[in-house]
Image (cartoon, rainbow, N blue to C red):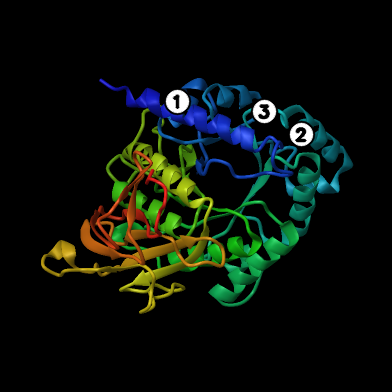
Amino acid sequence: MINWQKITVLVVLISGVACNLSTAGDTADRWQIGVPIATYYAGPPMTETAARQMAEAGFNLVWCNEQELDTAQKFGLRALLTAPETMNPQTMNDEGQIAKLDALIKRVRKHPAMYAYYIIDEPSASLFPLLGKLVAHLREKDPYHMAYINLFPTYATNEQLGNTGDTVSAYLKHLNLFMEQVKPDLLSYDHYHFTSGGNDGNQYFLNLGMIREKAMEAGIPFLNIVQGCTWCEGMRPPNRNEMRWLNYTSLAYGAQGISYYVYYSPGHYYDRFGGNVGGMMKPDGSTTPQYEAAKELNPQFIAVASELQPLHSLAVYHKGTVPWGAKGLPDNASFSVKFSGEEPLSTMPDEGILLGYFGNKGGNPTHVLVVNLNYKRALQTTVVGPARLSLFDASTRKWTEADGSSADITLPPGGGKLFRGEPTESPVR
């Protein structure tokens, strides 16, 4: 019998080493993303048990303090270094703290597990000038490791953002100030979509689209922190299908990183859902249904994001229902979908279909990621492209040619499929 857990750990080990080589400064003068990111926000201490558990589920970026870097390295994991007493915005106001920071950087910058420095979560715009100084200082002292900052979602209050205006204008101002004053290497934000009672928020695609635009303007990758648990009465723990929806919608908009809130945090364990409150781990160290879902979804996310990494996100369209902040699919679209209508599975879902277009910058789309926006049922559809289609298998990482410029597929609830529609002279991988 094949031991898939051992294979998963081996893949993560190889991925971690490959990423460290790509960011070591041999071919670039500053941090590069390397292998797409699968991570979490808030987790347990980085013991060997925790590291093994994370590696087996395909997580490849873990939270560590300085003393835990060796453990991350042992399991082929990249480290997001935390040192809150030294790395925070106020450091730049204190020469003594700057000296401590420089000493820390000198100790860790050549560690094989080092990937990024954790700075702050959801800062107000009033902190952006200091954060800009801190990021610039870190970049000067260690250009090969990212300074990580996570931003508020669109539904944050103006007081939290430190700006004024309606939802769109206040958030756009927030993003513009952040990009101008901080100049990040990666754009990260969180947005929690699934509320109690089976309801969903109405700003998910608005937020995703605004982040995508800013990341594209700056030529940097972005990461989406998505819901993985409940922490209050108003939010529900997502199931496997809903987590798949979060992964594939992020990918279709061009995300190169996915993060779950949370892996485990005692302060976010709110039990009114019959014992399963989400997160990846229970207080006793055992895993949850969300962990098992992430174990399936993390490798898929990394596989699809890796295929898309050399390309540019050219456009994102919704066919059928068009949510707030999104664009409808034009009539002359390069890639589209059609339904036979012969049975319930072959009809357009009420939530619509999402199509993310990718290709060379300034060129025509060559790839499309088609996503079923109904996370409750599968659907059958026909994908139509500009040339002979090939379908990517996220499990095997192989491409298979279709018979022509159209292909019949079944999309799982909330799931997606990646196609390319360009003539190929070489054999399909």
Q: Position of residue 193 (x, y in %)?
A: 41, 59
User: Camera-side residue: 371 or 285?
Assistant: 371
Reading the image, the residue beneath label 2 is 105
- The residue sitting at 76% across, 55% down in the picture is 132
189 to 104, vertically: above or below: below
118 to 181, vertically: above or below: above
Q: Is residue 130 left or right of residue 414?
A: right
Measure how far apart labels 2 and 3 are at the Cα level: 10 Å
Between disc 2 and disc 3, the foreground one is 2
Mark 3 Cα-neighbour bin, 10 Å: few <14, some 14–19, many ≥20: some
Q: Secondary structure at mark 1?
A: helix
- The residue sitting at 73% across, 64% down in the picture is 180
The reply to whether residue 40 is visible in this rendering is yes
Amino acid tagged 1: Leu
Give me the disc on residue 25.
Answer: none
Query: Nearer the N terminus, badge 1 or badge 2?
Result: 1
- CB atoms of marks 1 and 3 within 8 Å: no
Amino acid tagged 2: Ile
Reading the image, the residue beneath label 3 is 66
The reply to whether residue 79 is visible in this rendering is no
- The residue sitting at 69% across, 36% down in the picture is 83
- Most extreme residue toward the left is 342
- The residue sitting at 81% across, 44% down in the picture is 140
Q: Secondary structure at mark 2?
A: helix
Reading the image, the residue beneath label 1 is 10
The image quadrant of residue 88 is top right
Amino acid tagged 3: Glu
